[in-house]
Image: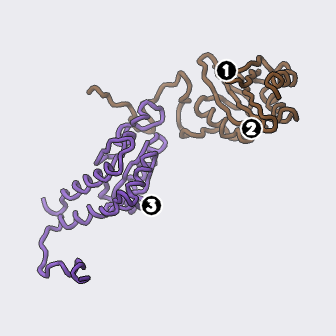
């Protein structure tokens, strides 16, 4: 019984054919490690998304404490002008290929603090953004869907084939 | 001690430092003082054995034609509150720092300097507390103009009608 459940024993003995791109993209898409960086109240929802109920570990995503080990930057919260240069530095420290999710209204366009003197009106003014998630804050389900969108994007990318 | 008793006591002790004494709508006592006498008044309020006030809060106000600083004090032994107010001129808002009497006022006064531009003479470290050091202007002033650019970031609000 245990031998049947073991995935190695269930694989056919014949070789599996695929392209290098597809194999690489499958691996990259299912090991998206994100940078542990909460800026405001969205980070509470980000923690909840990493928690047991809407566990994004099952998509291969887990948090890293350093940008050098991260593939994904989730901008969770309000970006003040004082923080903007630091955020850009963190983005630049990440290794390519890298992806960005703008989580919540504040990261999308400034949100509630649009008319404030100290708030950056959207993170796309300083770094390129792949997925925007609306909401104030977005629910963990929404963030999970954003992650799946990033995975879909990664799976379409081509390195070796044209 | 009754409220009127407190008002009389403060009037007698501070004499001509006081411009006016009145009751506020929430039944607290407000004394407005001449700004040159702030250290003298604070010293009496703190060290007089019949008053023994501690400071609980400090704020600045922009009244367009003048500035004001407000100190909220509370006496733990005698359980009464008092509000001390001093008006400053609009051109050069300056007042003596009360840091030498209440040491905890250090950061409060730095915040007021940061956001309203009121200079506290004799403060040990009068730098910006919240905003970055290269920020121009004091954002909570009524005549403050919101900057479009900061640190080479175009922070203009996108035109929603495009």
Q: Residue B48, percent across and down?
A: 86, 33
What residue lies at 19% left-to-right and 67% top-to-bottom?
A23
What residue did someone put label 2 on? B99
How far apart are the two marked residues, 2 and 3, measured between alpha carbons?
Answer: 40 Å
The secondary structure type at the circle numbered 2 is: loop
Residue B119 in the figure: left or right of residue A103: right
- Chain name for mark 2: B
Q: Nearer the N terminus, badge 2 or badge 1?
A: 1
Q: Which picture quadrant has residue A5?
A: bottom left
What residue lies at 33% left-to-right and 31% top-to-bottom?
B158
Q: Residue A60, percent across and down?
A: 31, 64
Colour used to depict chain B in the structure image: brown
Instruction: Look at the picture and state if B83 lies above or below B150.
Output: above
Label 3 crowd (10 A; few <14 / some 14-19 / many >=20): few
Instruction: Look at the picture and state if A116 lies above or below A35.
Output: above
Looking at the image, is mark 2 or mark 1 nearer the viewer? 1
Looking at the image, is mark 1 or mark 3 nearer the viewer? 1
Q: Residue B76, percent across and down?
A: 78, 38
What residue did someone put label 3 on? A65
Residue A14 in the figure: left or right of residue A52: left
Q: Residue B69, percent across and down?
A: 68, 26
Instruction: Look at the picture and state if B38 lies above or below B20.
Output: below
Q: Which picture quadrant has residue B15?
A: top right
Q: Nearer the viewer, residue A26 or A94?
A: A26
Colour used to depict chain A in the structure image: purple
- Chain name for mark 3: A
What residue did someone put label 1 on? B25
Establish whether labels 1 and 3 are both on one chain: no
Residue A110 in the figure: left or right of residue A15: right
The secondary structure type at the circle numbered 3 is: loop
Q: Nearer the viewer, residue B72 or A126?
A: B72
Instruction: Look at the picture and state if A76 lies above or below B99.
Output: below
């Amino acid at each position: 019984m245990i031998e049947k459940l073991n995935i190695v024993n269930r694989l056919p003995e014949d070789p599996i054919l695929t392209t290098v791109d597809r194999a690489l993209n499958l691996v990259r898409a299912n090991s998206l490690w994100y940078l542990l960086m909460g800026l405001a109240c969205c980070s509470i929802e980000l923690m909840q998304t990493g928690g047991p109920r809407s566990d994004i570990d099952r998509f291969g995503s887990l948090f890293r404490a350093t940008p050098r080990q991260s593939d994904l930057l989730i901008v969770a919260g309000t970006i003040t002008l004082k923080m903007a240069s630091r955020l850009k530095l963190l983005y630049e420290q990440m290794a390519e290929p890298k992806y960005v999710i703008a989580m919540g209204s504040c990261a999308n366009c400034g949100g509630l603090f649009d008319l404030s003197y100290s708030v950056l009106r959207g993170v796309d003014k300083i770094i390129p953004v792949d997925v925007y998630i609306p909401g104030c804050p977005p629910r963990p389900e929404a963030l999970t869907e954003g992650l799946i969108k990033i995975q879909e994007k990664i799976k379409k990318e081509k390195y070796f084939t044209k | 001690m009754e409220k009127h008793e407190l008002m009389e006591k403060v009037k007698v002790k501070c004499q001509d430092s006081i411009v006016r004494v009145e009751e506020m709508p929430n039944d607290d006592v407000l004394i407005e003082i001449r700004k040159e006498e702030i250290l003298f008044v604070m010293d009496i309020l703190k060290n007089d054995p019949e008053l023994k006030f501690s400071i609980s809060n400090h704020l600045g106000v922009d009244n367009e034609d003048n500035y004001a600083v407000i100190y909220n004090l509370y006496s733990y032994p005698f359980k009464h509150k008092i509000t001390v107010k001093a008006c400053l001129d609009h051109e050069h808002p300056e007042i003596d720092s009360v840091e030498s009497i209440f040491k905890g006022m250090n950061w409060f006064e730095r915040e007021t300097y940061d956001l309203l531009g009121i200079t506290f003479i004799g403060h040990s470290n009068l730098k910006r507390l919240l905003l970055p050091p290269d920020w121009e202007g004091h954002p909570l002033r009524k005549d403050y103009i919101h900057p479009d650019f900061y640190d080479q970031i175009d922070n203009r609000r996108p035109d929603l009608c495009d």
